[in-house]
Image (cartoon, helix red, strand yellow):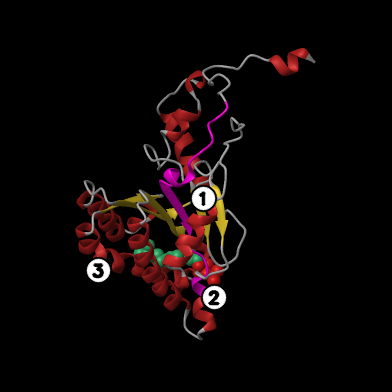
């Protein structure tokens, strides 16, 4: 019995952490991740093609980036196209690709002027050369902006990200003994970024959908029935308020 409970930690895992101090949650919302769901339903309700819902979703995203910057959120990550979305009808996939490309072209200058730093999270190499170039140029142009970071998860999948990381770890010849959580994190698309404090999912679904699987291990989750194209400042404030009611413990105890 004793052995079961007193086993020595292996390798470089850290020692038992002390209880954490009671948190001041409002100071901790650095990073919000959003699963922007419900574009299709929004369009269907209006007898519009699904792509009209995605276009309205882009407008919602513009609003939310502004609101988040005003609320001093440091970073937003948005799920714009998953590795599984390739399985949608060809017309919708093509429409989403075109919309993404057009949005970068139409919005990049304003985003840059407004101090938004763009990042891309996902498998770049599977995207068309035009889109790859648009992404790389926009990331480069905005790299010194500091007002807010917008991480666009486009052709992103949490499992694919782990596969890519493991492949690279092996390609780099890492010794199994040096593999720990920090090392794995440093091989993810999000290397150097803070984990999301809050994950918001719109349109009432209660699924993680392969989004930031590793990074959201201790994120707070907030689900709303609001469809993404209808999401705005009030909804963001409601999510932040809900977050602020919570006590984050990261699996530990809070010191009294
Ligand atoms: C999920 O709604 C939404 C998507 C798969 C795409 C989200 C994309 C955008 C908001 C546009 C992204 C563009 C840029 C420039 C970042 P759904 O289609 O699954 O909706 P449904 O569940 O109601 O059918």
Mark nearer the N terminus (2 vs 3): 2
Mark nearer the N terminus (1 vs 2): 2
Element marked by disc 2: helix
Name the spot of residue 230 as percent of width and height, x first: 46, 73
Element marked by disc 1: helix
Can the viewer see residue 235? Answer: yes
Q: Which mark is residue 6?
A: none
Residue farthest toward the right in the current orientation of the protein: 1
Marks 3 and 1 in Cβ contact (< 8 Å): no
Task: Return the residue at label 3.
Answer: 106
Q: In percent of the image, x 38 and y 40: which residue is there?
A: 193
Q: Which residues are magenta?
A: 19-40
Location of the N terminus by quadrant is: top right
Task: Return the residue at label 2.
Answer: 41
Q: Give the left or right position of residue 8, taking residue 175 as reference.
A: right
For label 3, count other residues whose C-alpha is less than 10 Å away and answer few (under 14), some (14-19) or many (20+).
few
The residue at label 2 has a CB less than 8 Å from ligand 1: yes
Task: Return the residue at label 1.
Answer: 244
Name the spot of residue 217 as percent of width and height, x first: 55, 41
Q: In percent of the image, x 27 and y 60: which residue is there?
A: 130
Q: In percent of the image, x 51 and y 74: which residue is there?
A: 40
User: Marks 1/2: CA distance?
Assistant: 30 Å
In the rendered image, the vertical position of residue 235 relative to residue 139, given as above or below: below
Q: Of residues 151 and 155, which is closer to you in this image?
A: 151
In the rendered image, the vertical position of residue 90 relative to residue 24, given as above or below: below
User: Marks 3/1: CA distance?
Assistant: 35 Å
Q: In percent of the image, x 70 and y 15: which residue is there?
A: 6
Q: Give the number of the mark in front: 1 or 2.
A: 1
Q: Of residues 245 and 252, which is closer to you in this image?
A: 245
Marks 2 and 3 in Cβ contact (< 8 Å): no
Name the spot of residue 251 as percent of width and height, x first: 61, 34
């Amino acid at each position: 019995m004793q052995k079961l409970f007193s086993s020595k930690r292996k390798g470089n895992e850290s020692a038992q952490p002390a209880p954490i101090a009671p948190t001041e949650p409002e100071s901790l919302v650095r990073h919000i991740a959003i699963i922007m769901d419900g574009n299709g339903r929004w369009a269907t309700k209006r007898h519009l093609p699904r792509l009209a819902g995605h276009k309205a979703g882009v407008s919602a995203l513009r609003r939310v980036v502004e609101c988040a910057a005003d609320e001093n959120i440091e970073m937003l990550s948005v799920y714009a196209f998953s590795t599984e979305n390739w399985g949608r009808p060809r017309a919708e996939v093509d429409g989403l690709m075109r919309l993404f490309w057009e949005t970068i072209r139409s919005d990049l200058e304003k985003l840059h002027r407004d101090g938004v730093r763009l990042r891309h999270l996902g498998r770049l190499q599977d995207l068309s050369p035009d889109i790859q170039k648009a992404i790389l140029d926009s990331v480069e142009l905005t790299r010194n902006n500091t007002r807010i970071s917008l991480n666009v998860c486009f052709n992103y999948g949490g499992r694919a990200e782990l596969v890519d990381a493991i492949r690279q770890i092996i390609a780099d010849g890492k010794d199994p003994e040096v593999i720990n959580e920090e090392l794995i994190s440093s091989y993810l698309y999000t290397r150097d970024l803070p984990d999301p404090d809050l994950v918001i999912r719109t349109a009432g679904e209660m699924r993680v959908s392969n989004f930031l699987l590793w990074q959201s291990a201790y994120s707070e989750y907030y689900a709303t029935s609001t469809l993404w194209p209808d999401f705005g400042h009030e909804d963001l404030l409601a999510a932040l308020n809900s977050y602020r009611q919570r006590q984050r413990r990261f699996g530990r105890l809070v010191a009294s």
